[in-house]
Image (spheres, rainbow, N blue to C red):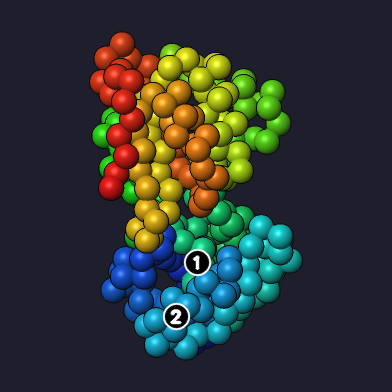
Amino acid sequence: MVPNGKGTLCVVATPLGNLKDITLRALEVLKGSDLIAAEDTRRTQKLLSAYDLHVPLISFNENNQYRKIPFLIERLKQGQQVSLVTDGGTPGISDPGRELVRETRQARITVVPIPGPSALICALSVSGLPGDSFIFLGFLPRRKSRRKRILQEMKEQKRTVIFYEAPHRIRDLLKEIEAVLGEREVTLTRELTKIHEEIISGPVSELLRQLADREPKGEYTLLLAPEEKESSEFGSQAFVYP
């Protein structure tokens, strides 16, 4: 707490799965917080319990964020330190947090980033695809016509394109990529840093074949190779790690 002054909003990145990926600074900040705004309080409580941290939690997710923002801003104005966390990764990156950060800054209250895990960066680092220039599009719209339009815009894209996708929609997205972009190289990752971590790279048709044999589970990060004649280095074989 900051006596007689405005507090601080700390945007804290937390582990994607493996709790050992928490940074020392993140633990220090969480321990010193007056309140933690968590996307899923049950999941965050597991993290706190693992490190014997005892800090009050409040639910802050896409369904209640607009109701909770005034309360959190008031706590910050009272001089408290509030930490914002998601289920895993960095808040505000396809997760709740952007509006809270905007309103906090507009209130001239300090916002501090506490960097750490990010699913898209984690996936990019092991994809073997160009990482010097990339586009992150998060979750594509659910409406098929809008998704198709976005994919068409990627036809001549010379940068790696990264999407997030839910397991029950990943096969449809791969089929749409194949229909719009042809036999493009793709890397799929899921459950990164967790027990069932999986990384698959290969032509989109091969990945579709593999997913046809099992029910997709876990949120996916999909990386689309740039449009290059040399992008067919995998040939017709998909590579699965581990």
* Residue under label 1: 85
* One can see residue 37 in this view: no
The percent position of residue 158, horizontal first and vertical second, equals 37, 19
Q: Residue 48 shows which numbered tag?
A: 2
The percent position of residue 127, horizontal first and vertical second, equals 30, 37
The answer to which of 39 and 74 lies nearer the viewer is: 39
Up-down: is 95 above or below 35? Answer: above
The percent position of residue 50, horizontal first and vertical second, equals 39, 81
Give how far apart the Cα atoms at labels 2 and 1 are: 12 Å
Which mark's residue is nearer the viewer, 2 or 1?
A: 2
- Residue occupying image coordinates x 60% and y 39%: 169
Q: Residue 240 shows which numbered tag?
A: none
- Residue occupying image coordinates x 56% and y 58%: 97
The answer to which of 186 and 105 lies nearer the viewer is: 186
**Quadrant housing residue 157:** top left
Q: Badge 1: few (under 14), some or many (20 or more) residues near its Cα, within 10 Å?
A: many
Q: Residue furthest front?
A: 213
Up-down: is 207 above or below 10? Answer: above
Q: Residue furthest right?
A: 67
* One can see residue 130 in this view: yes
Amino acid found under the numbered disc labelled 2: Leu
The answer to which of 234 and 21 lies nearer the viewer is: 234
Secondary structure category for the residue under label 1: strand
- Residue occupying image coordinates x 44% and y 76%: 47
> In the image, 5: left or right of 201?
right
Who comes first in sequence, dot 2 or dot 1? 2
Secondary structure category for the residue under label 2: helix
Amino acid found under the numbered disc labelled 1: Val
The percent position of residue 13, horizontal first and vertical second, equals 41, 62
Q: Residue furthest top?
A: 229
